[in-house]
């Protein structure tokens, strides 16, 4: 046992050698030389630090343990990396683990100092970092603080001092690599792939070999130096696992983040579906103004809400048409710029591309750069709701391909989730649809199943217009929840179009453009509808001469005329004869019926039950009996 202990005993470690190994890696990263800098009061004496005062090091044996805090890196000859800086010298020292960067010689060159700071912040060598910029000049190096990365040389020495005295395990189960690299090894490993502590070497991406390195923030970067290619890899899914569920206190669960109207919800995709010209676009504009102002524009009795930030995108109309529509809606609802407060953003698909999936041959490709740009802009503007109209203009998928439509909807869901916002997709219905339901949306069930909440828009029918007592049924529509799996579906919401003149005309046409704006409308009560109908009927007989009515009453009293318009001897036939109206004509027949009802309302005529020639009792129209004193 004693012999074994003697054979495994380790010789004392030299701290200088340990620190030197890790320190040299930083020198390589910054393309610099190891040096010792002057020290004063326990920190770097920058006033005394010049090229003459620093000491260059060639080996770990050239300094003492007490010199470890004085270790620094001298980087010069910056014309290797940038256009100027040939005479510039920059020293990077570490004070208590925090990098301190100082230019000590040459004309002032902020770019040289920034280059060192960016390399430390991104944990990339200067060559790799510049290669990344050259490969994608539109993608700037992230503006992060260099304090993210530190090199505490004294802590390294202390750590190894502890390891020297600590017992060494016979079987150390800690893997000598970052476990976050394992999914990338599985996904991109080739026959010659090697997994090390800092990367996957020999990885194969797009049939090109290179290395995969993890960035400080967890992003994975694929580097192919031969082709100067740098690719940010998507996160590789973790292995499938089953997570146990345990009941807890439901009051501690976070609430769903409803944004507006029990339809818009954060981190989900929602949709509004209806026929062309059915009010979807105008309705979304009124809603957008309600959201950014916090005013209940579509619910007169509703409360004020928290103002939201909305990005309204029309992928088809030009920007000037978008401007006209929003100006008209703002004019109608008396919305001011102060109330909008810079929270509204509008864009046209004619000026920018908003395509999330493109067809390449037989394959549908999700446009990953667009998703990244979209998420970044939503985060930058802190946008809560993005309304996209129409959905069909954001993809090149075949709408009858359920698989393709599901991928497009899933891509928009990614945007909603990663940007922490709601995505509202305004969508059309298939042709020749009657009553619009959730199944009417183009794209089959895949689209309906992928969105969290779907509203359907239906134009008022002629029959509904008659019941409501309105004239132009096409100016009214209703909004229903065709599919909602967050709350119980409520009653229909009715809306109507009103025409708003922009007064942008010239000469005699002062009104200029007339823009349709959507506002709330309530279905009238039964009593209100009845009163309106009665007034309209009364207007039909208001100018009938008294002698004409008297003659009609004589004829009705002398013979039996039935109240049913299906009867051969219908009383309406006699009214048509008196007023030269063809009761076979639909509109004339409706007018005759209304006139009979008006005289009954006025007490001139009445419905009485009379036995006909076949001894069947049926309602007949007769002159009303004179009131008795």
Image (cartoon, helix red, strand yellow):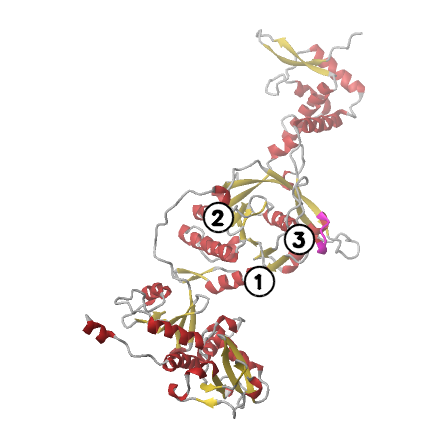
Q: Where is residue 496 drawn, in percent x and y? A: 65, 41
Residue appearing at x 76%, y 16% in the figure: 551
Residue range highlighted in magenta: 333-338
The residue that disc 1 covers is 380
Q: Residue at x 48, y 86 (%)?
A: 74
- Quick one: 330 or 621, which is closer to the camera? 330
Pointer 2 or 1: first along the chain: 1
What is the spatial separation of the Cα atoms under label 3 and label 2, in whole angstroms?
27 Å
Pointer 3 local density, CA inside 10 Å: few below 14, some 14–19, many at least 20: many
> In the image, is residue 571 above or below residue 420?
above
Q: Secondary structure at mark 2?
A: loop
Mark 1: few/some/many CA within 10 Å (<14, 14-19, 20+): few
Q: Which is nearer the N-term, disc 1 or disc 3?
A: 3
Instruction: Give above or below for 48 relative to 130.
Output: below
* Occupied quadrant, residue 207: bottom left
Instruction: Give percent across and percent down for residue 23.
Output: 42, 80
Spot occupied by residue 91 in the image (x, y as percentages of width and height): 51, 84
Q: Residue furthest front?
A: 2
Residue marked by disc 3: 325
Which corner quadrant holds the N terminus?
A: bottom left
Q: Identify the residue shown where x is 47% and y is 58%.
A: 396
| Quadrant for the C terminus in the image | top right
Question: Mark 3 and mark 1 in contact (Cβ < 8 Å)?
Answer: no
Earlier residue among tags 3 and 2: 3
Helix or strand or loop: what does disc 3 sit on?
helix
Magenta residue check for 185: no
Q: In this rendering, is residue 455 above or below 124?
A: above
For mark 2, does the 10 Å Cα neighbourhood hold few (<14), some (14 to 19), or many (20 or more) residues? many
* Disc assigned to residue 451: 2
Front in this rendered view, residue 158 or 624: 158
């Amino acid at each position: 046992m004693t012999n074994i202990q003697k054979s495994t005993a380790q010789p004392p470690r030299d701290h200088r050698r340990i620190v030197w190994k890790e320190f040299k890696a930083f020198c390589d990263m910054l393309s610099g030389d190891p040096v010792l800098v002057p020290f004063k009061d326990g920190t770097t004496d920058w006033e005394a630090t010049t090229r003459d005062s620093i000491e260059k090091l060639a080996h770990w044996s050239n300094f003492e343990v007490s010199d470890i805090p004085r270790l620094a890196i001298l980087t010069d000859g910056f014309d290797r990396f940038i256009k100027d800086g040939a005479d510039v010298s920059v020293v990077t020292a570490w004070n208590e683990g925090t990098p301190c960067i100082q230019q000590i010689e040459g004309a002032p060159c902020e770019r040289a100092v920034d280059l060192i700071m960016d390399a430390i912040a991104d944990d990339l060598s200067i060559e790799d970092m510049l290669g990344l910029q050259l490969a994608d000049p539109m993608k700037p190096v992230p503006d992060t603080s260099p304090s993210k990365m530190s090199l505490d040389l004294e802590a390294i020495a202390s750590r190894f001092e502890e390891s020297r005295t600590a017992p060494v395990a016979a079987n150390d189960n800690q893997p000598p690599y970052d476990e976050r690299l394992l999914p990338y090894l599985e996904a991109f490993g080739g026959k010659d792939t090697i997994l090390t502590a800092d990367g996957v070497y020999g990885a194969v991406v797009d049939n090109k070999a290179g290395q995969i390195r993890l960035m400080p923030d967890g992003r994975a970067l694929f580097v192919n130096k031969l082709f100067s290619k740098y690719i940010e890899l998507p996160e590789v899914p973790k292995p499938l696992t089953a997570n146990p569920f345990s009941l807890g206190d439901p009051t501690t669960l976070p609430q769903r983040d409803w944004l507006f109207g029990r339809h818009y919800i954060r981190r989900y995709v929602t949709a509004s579906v209806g026929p062309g010209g059915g009010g979807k676009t105008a309705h979304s504009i009124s809603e957008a103004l309600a959201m950014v102002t916090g005013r209940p524009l579509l619910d007169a009795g509703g409360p004020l809400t928290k103002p939201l930030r909305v990005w309204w995108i029309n992928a088809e109309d030009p920007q000037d048409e978008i401007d006209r529509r929003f100006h008209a809606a703002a004019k109608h609802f008396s919305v001011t710029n102060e109330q909008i407060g810079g929270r509204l953003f509008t864009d046209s698909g004619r000026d920018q591309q908003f395509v999330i999936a493109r067809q390449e041959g037989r394959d549908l490709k999700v446009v990953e750069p667009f998703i990244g740009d979209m998420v970044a802009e939503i985060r930058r503007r802190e946008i809560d709701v993005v309304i996209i109209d129409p959905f069909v203009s954001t993809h090149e998928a075949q709408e009858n391909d359920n698989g393709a439509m599901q991928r497009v909807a899933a891509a928009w869901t990614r945007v909603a989730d990663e940007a922490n916002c709601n995505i509202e997709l305004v969508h059309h219905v298939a042709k020749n649809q009657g009553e619009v339901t959730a199944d009417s949306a183009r794209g089959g069930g895949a689209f309906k199943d992928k969105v969290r909440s779907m509203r359907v828009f239906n134009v008022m029918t002629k029959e509904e217009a008659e019941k409501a007592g309105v004239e132009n049924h096409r100016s009214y529509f209703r909004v229903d929840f065709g599919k909602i799996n967050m709350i119980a579906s409520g009653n229909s919401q009715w809306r109507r179009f009103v025409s708003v003149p922009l007064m942008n005309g010239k000469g005699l046409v002062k009104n200029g453009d007339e823009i349709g704006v959507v506002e709330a409308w309530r279905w009238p009560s039964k009593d209100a509808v009845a009163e309106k109908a009665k007034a309209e009927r009364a207007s039909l007989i208001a100018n009938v001469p008294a002698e004409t009515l008297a003659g009609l009453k004589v004829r009705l009293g002398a013979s039996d005329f039935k109240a049913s318009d299906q009867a051969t001897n219908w009383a309406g036939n006699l009214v048509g004869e008196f007023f030269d109206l063809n009761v076979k004509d639909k509109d004339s027949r409706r007018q005759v019926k209304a006139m009979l009802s008006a005289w009954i309302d006025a007490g001139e005529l009445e419905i009485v039950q009379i036995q006909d020639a076949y001894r069947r009792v049926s309602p007949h129209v007769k002159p009303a009996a004179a009131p008795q004193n």
